[in-house]
Amino acid sequence: MARLKEIADKVASAWNITGPFNMQIIKADNASTGVPDLKVIECNIRASRSFPFVSKVLGVNFIDVAVKSLLNESVPAPVDLMSKKYDYVATKVPQFSFTRLAGADPFLGVEMASTGEVACFGHDVVEAYWTSMQATMNFHIPKPPSGILFGGDLNKDYLGNVSKTIESLGYKYYAASPAVAEYLSKYTTNPVEVIEFPKDNKRELREVFQKYDIKCVFNLARDRADSLQDEDYVMRRNAIDFAIPLFNEPQTSLLFAQALSQKLPAKLANEGKDEVVIPKEVGRWSEFIGGKPV
């Protein structure tokens, strides 16, 4: 955090920025130094969608502060809000519109692809992410014993760790190729069934998804597909077209798996009760920041 603040200070000083601005900073592990590399990939001298989000999270109306600064009237004294300890976490989850882009590969890179976000609070990052995901439009939590289809990059541990994290929940595991099944067998004790996967007949593929009751797809893509016959492209694209949750970014895939492992049992238990039970993660924003109006 200290390095991020230092970068922000240097950029603001170099460009003589006196008003709101936002930056995107990419983080990459550096095995040789053991210290992550940080690089600024974008800086916008304007108020962004993050401006009200940060105001809500930190409990300070930054729009009000910015206007007072511009007018040089009643400017509040600087406060190091990031040095304060907070007992909550807030996350922003992207809302995509891949359903409106027929045939497009729902591959995620560094480009802005979301058309909106959903922001939620939680007592930790898992709870905040779990709540945010359920608040996105047309998202449905996959419930056991439905099927989960795996695919994508087999060169790293992410996909395997996802399968291991949720193996006790009762899902059925499926793969479109023997290579994926063999890879997963190194991480999970759950059996992985290799299923038929027609790549050039959408109707037949839909029937396959229905036959195996596939309700979630983890496809951790390394690159954008270069062919419409690419197995991973077909898997990703049809998950979107069939309105099935798709996770294709490694770290958020693992985070969602952790959320399922920690939160799904209680959710299923509450759904089995006669009375309506409000999940403990559901609460007012003011309950997290102490009721202070912003």
Image: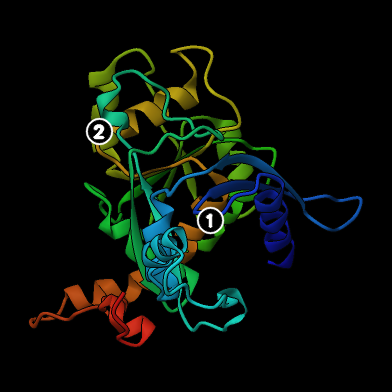
Residue 242's mark? 2
- Residue 64 horizontal/vertical position (percent): 37, 66
Between 270 and 99, which is closer to the camera in this rendering?
Answer: 99
Q: In front here: 161 or 245?
A: 245
Q: What amino acid does circle 1 point to?
A: Leu
Is residue 221 placed above or below 66 in the rendered structure?
above
**Which element carries disc 1, helix, strand or loop?**
helix
Q: Quadrant of the N terminus?
A: bottom right
Position of the C terminus by quadrant = bottom left
Q: How busy is the neighbourhood of tag 1: few (under 14 within 10 Å), some, or many (20 plus)?
A: many
Looking at the rendered structure, the kind of residue marked 2 is: Phe
* Residue with the most extreme right position: 32
Q: Position of residue 46 (x, y in %)?
A: 46, 45
Q: How many marks?
A: 2
Residue 153 x, y percent position in the rendering: 61, 35
For the question of whether residue 127 can be seen, the reply is: no
Could you say whether the residue bearing mark 2 is in a helix, strand or loop?
loop
Q: Position of residue 277 (x, y in %)?
A: 17, 81
Label 2, label 1: how far apart the Cα atoms are:
23 Å
Which residue is at 50% across, 59% downward?
255
Q: Is residue 122 above or below residue 70?
A: below
Question: Vertical placement of 201 versus 134: above or below?
Answer: above
| Residue at image mark 1 | 254
Say whether disc 2 or disc 1 marks the residue closer to the N-terminus: 2
Q: Is 127 positioned to the left or the right of 41 in the image? A: left
In this figure, which colouring scheme has been used for the structure?
rainbow
Question: Is residue 171 placed above or below 113 in the rendered structure?
Answer: below
